Image (cartoon, coloured by chain):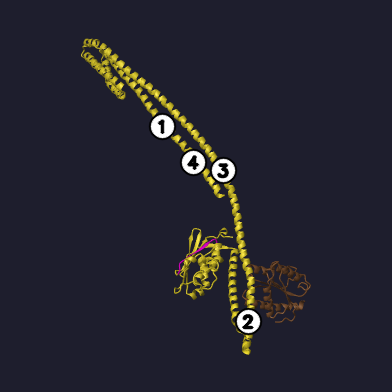
Chain colours: A yellow, B brown
Amino acid sequence: MITTVRNRFVVSEGRFGRVLVTFMALGFLALVGAGIAAGWATSRNADYTRWVNHTYEVELSVSNARRLIEQGEASRRGYLLTGNVEYRDAYRRWAASLTPALVRLQRLTRDNPRQVAALRVLRTEIAALLVQRGRTMALIDAGRIEAATALFRGEASVRRLAVIRNAFEGMAVTERRLLEQRDAAQRANVRAFYVILAIAAVLLAFVALASLLTVLRYTRDLSQSRDTLRDFNARLEETVSERTADLSRANEEIQRFAYIVSHDLRSPLVNVMGFTAELSAATTPLTEMLDRAEAECPGIVSEDARLAVREDLPEAIGFIRTSTQKMDRLINAILKLSREGRRVITPEPIDPAAVTETIAGSIRHLLDDRGVTLTVERPIPGLVTDRVALEQILSNLIENATKYLQPGRPGTITVSGESRRDRVILSVADNGRGIDPRDHQRIFDLFRRSGQQDQPGEGIGLAHVRALAYRLGGTIDVDSALGRGSTFRINLPKAFDVQDSPS
Amino acid sequence: MNAPHQSVGIVMIEDDEGHARLIEKNIRRAGILNDIKHFTDGTQALHYLFEAADGPAKSGPALVLLDLNLPDMSGTDILAQIKAEGSALKRTPVVVLTTTDDKIEIQRCYDLGCNVYITKPVNYESFAQAIRQLGLFLSVIQVPEVEEH
């Protein structure tokens, strides 16, 4: 169920994501393209504008140079007619301005071979004109007005002027044609710009629409998925609480089962034990009778009867007794574990170091008898948990450590603790005989023991410890090697939470 | 230890024949010769206790030995009925004899008014010892009965 829902969700998300990203990328590409095109068109436009301006400037320069020549001519004629010095001065001013104007014109038209050729002709003509004029002006200055007038009459000034005017006109016409061309190009460019803008706008609108549709569809799918998830979540919670109820019911069932079984097993055991005692009591008069018979009338005592009374009966009774006693202890262990599972946990702030000291105090004689040193490595972080359970865990582990010593080595037990985020890890380390790594899991099982069976016990302690650790929401593990001691680590929550505990 | 009057009847409610036999043997061995009436289920026992003409409610005083695990009802129900307010047997001593040593259950029995609670141990010697002590107890409680009834 979970897998299907998740897969469907992932698939649709992936597809929509891809479509969305494609459209976004297309949109941005269109935008970038439009931007580049616009920039290109704008720069083209600026170029055209510059060229148009240039044309106007050339036209202006042409007419300026023309004006200077015409004005120079007018001044010369004025000087010739009147001899007024003011005309001469004006002429000189016009003549002086002419050269820079021509230079400027040359510079402006440098790029146009046609204009350059025209200008070259023009300059030759103008230079000749200026020489002619200079001669006239010099004659006037010298007071030879007749000679000057004669020269003026004879010279080809008018024809030359006409040539110059034509040349200038030609240049102006060329420029005007250029202007028209450039104008047309600029208009075409602007049109292209608008076309690009229109295409970009259409593209953008299309992308926006497509993206909008995709987003809408995605959103719809998303909300559908969300609804599905919500329903699923609700069902999941239901399922979880059902399962939890099932589990706690099962757990209660097991507890009750263990309790009833152990309880009801004890009942027949009472009979077995009771009547074994009756049997045992009955052997006393039998033995007495046998003694008397052997003393008074040995002939009636058969060998079988003697063996039965003296050996078989006591032996059988002895085995029955030890077995039933053992069975009783085992049943008690199950009963204890099942009771532990039903005990209400009452969390309170506890200092494990103090608890350890108390345990050490209560088993002081045991430690002294076996020559074991117990050290508490302070500080041990405090925790909130069940006092009785923690006491039982620690005392079981410490007692175990005093029981399984390495021969020839004085026992040391170290209890320490460390805090790791919201957990506290308590360690009980010893230098005892150690546990075979193969048995590291087994020792926590009920009735299972490890190593040489030279110590009394039923294999209950560690099972009990693990049950308690689980009950406190914790875990326990062991790190040990044969002959090198063992370290038991209990990992407990810093603060006991009712939800941590099974059942 | 023989009682002068054997008027205190012992009512033993115990479904396990073996247990009943062991209890009886030990009571006798302790020198108690009171009449012992044995019931293996709660219904018959209750009928005898409250209804029977020769039962404790109608005639003589009695002591009840009660097992908590019975096939048809819980021993605590019988205890509750005996010790209920207005019951004719409210003052009748009840000794609860069971295999459980569960503290909560023991407490519950005392709360209901049980006089003595004895766990049936598998260790037979201490069991016999407990029964013998019960014998002493029986001889003690006979005294008021002599004057009253």
Residue farthest toward the bottom in the current orientation of the protein: A296
Q: Which residues are magenta?
A: A472-482
- Name which of mark 1 and mark 4 comes first in the sequence: 4
Cα distance in 3D space between marks 1 and 3 = 43 Å
**Secondary structure state at the residue bearing disc 1:** helix
- Name which of mark 1 and mark 3 comes first in the sequence: 1
Q: Is residue A292 visible?
A: no
**Secondary structure state at the residue bearing disc 4:** helix
Instruction: Check if mark 4's residue and mark 2's residue have beta carbons within 8 Å.
Output: no
Give percent across and percent down for residue A337. Answer: 58, 66
Residue A477 belongs to the span the image colors magenta: yes
**Which residue is tagged 4?**
A18
Of badges 1 and 3, nearer the viewer stands 3
**Secondary structure state at the residue bearing disc 2:** helix
- Name which of mark 4 and mark 3 comes first in the sequence: 4
**Secondary structure state at the residue bearing disc 3:** helix
Q: Is residue A202 visible?
A: yes
Of badges 4 and 2, nearer the viewer stands 2
At label 3, the amino acid type is: Ser
| Numbered mark located on residue A155 in the image | none
**Which residue is tagged 3?**
A223
Q: Quadrant of the C terminus of chain A?
A: bottom right
On the image, which quarter does residue A301 sit in?
A: bottom right
Viewer-nearest residue: A111 or A11? A11
At label 1, the amino acid type is: Gly
- Name which of mark 2 and mark 1 comes first in the sequence: 1
